[in-house]
Image: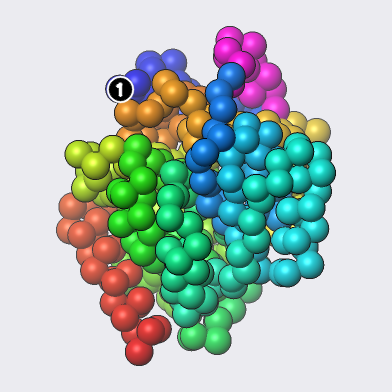
Amino acid sequence: MKTPGLINTVMDRLILPGAFGFTRLGYELRQWAWPSLDVSLQGKTVVITGATSGLGRSAAFSLAGLGARLVLVGRDREKTENTRDEISKTTGNDQVIVQLADLSLMAEVHELAERLLRDEPQIDVLINNAAVLPARRTLTTEGLELTFATDLLSPYLLTVLLIPRLRKSAPARIVNVLSGGMYFSGIDVGNLQNEKGRFDGSRAYARAKRGLMILTEQWADELRESRVTVNAMHPGWADTPGVEGSLPGFYKVTRSFLRTAEQGSDTIVWLAAAPEVSDTSGQFWLDREPHVTTVLPCTGGTPAERRDLRKTLEGYVEETMG
């Protein structure tokens, strides 16, 4: 199994050099050494959430181009169907399926999983990409804070519900899309809904992504003998509608250094398809290289916090489903 290299680890821990690696320049510096991704995904089914814009849309085009049967999960019917039509027209792949769900609502996540288990006898790859970064604390109709519900509880629930099908389809893969902002945040199990103190959208987002990293490591351990791998990645700083709309100040300052969506999504596609990572699990990736998961003390969560996270997420699911 490939482990984080010394140079990447030093750069990450020094923060600023690591941040340089998040830029377009960091991507361009690394990509020259990569072999082309010469692989076919024909006969493989890939489920990807947040597939209608930004990183998810870019990854969907690439995966369809590799021949995958692609299940696009989106909230807006017109937008998702238009994305499907554009992908099929561009790639010539007519095995692109639409599944509609508002992933901030656990009832709809349950319904989505039921449809997938009914319609997809084989699921080879699950990509948890959907996320939001609201500026203000907002509650869903189920009474959950929007960032927590969409960015952490939803991928937790969808993955748990689909793991039996992934096991049956093994070898299979789970890819969780995170953020470098996770480096600056720990997990506060007692404040998952961001009720305490002043709400900070970026901090809430980073906390959710830290939680998803902890889940990635836990699932990797639990599934180690199943031939289902679980990895996380972060795309660097990419020029996407989500970044422009949610972080306008950051976007204005860094725009000239931001990656394209295609550059940001490259590692998503690579983790979903590359033969060389078929047996690798529990890692955090940037630009096809594993990186450390923590750079600041105490941000990885204590053993007790990590155990409590799972119990708390289970409790929220039971509560929302009545």
Badge 1 element: loop
Query: Looking at this view, is 123 or 21 the one in front?
Result: 123
* Residue 287 % position (x, y): 55, 26
* Residue 59 % position (x, y): 64, 41
Q: Is residue 5 above or below residue 227?
A: above
Q: Is residue 233 magenta?
A: no
Q: Is residue 194 visible?
A: no
Residue at the image position 62 percent from the left and 32 percent from the top: 66
The quadrant in which residue 71 appears is: bottom right
Q: Is residue 94 left or right of residue 295?
A: right
Query: Looking at this view, is 37 or 131 the one in front?
Result: 37
Extreme residue toward the bottom, this view: 322
Q: Is residue 8 left or right of residue 38?
A: left
Query: Looking at this view, is 319 or 17 the one in front?
Result: 319
Q: Which image quarter is the C terminus in? A: bottom left
Q: Is residue 229 left or right of residue 37?
A: left
Range of the magenta residues? 24-37
* Residue 190 % position (x, y): 31, 71
Give the residue at mark 1: 1
Residue at the image position 22 percent from the left and 52 percent from the top: 302
Amino acid residing under circle 1? Met
Residue at the image position 30 percent from the left and 22 percent from the top: 1
Q: Is residue 181 above or below residue 275?
A: below
* Residue 135 % position (x, y): 65, 68
Crowding near the residue tagged with mark 1, few <14, some 14–19, many ≥20 C-alpha atoms within 10 Å: few
Residue at the image position 76 percent from the left and 38 percent from the top: 92
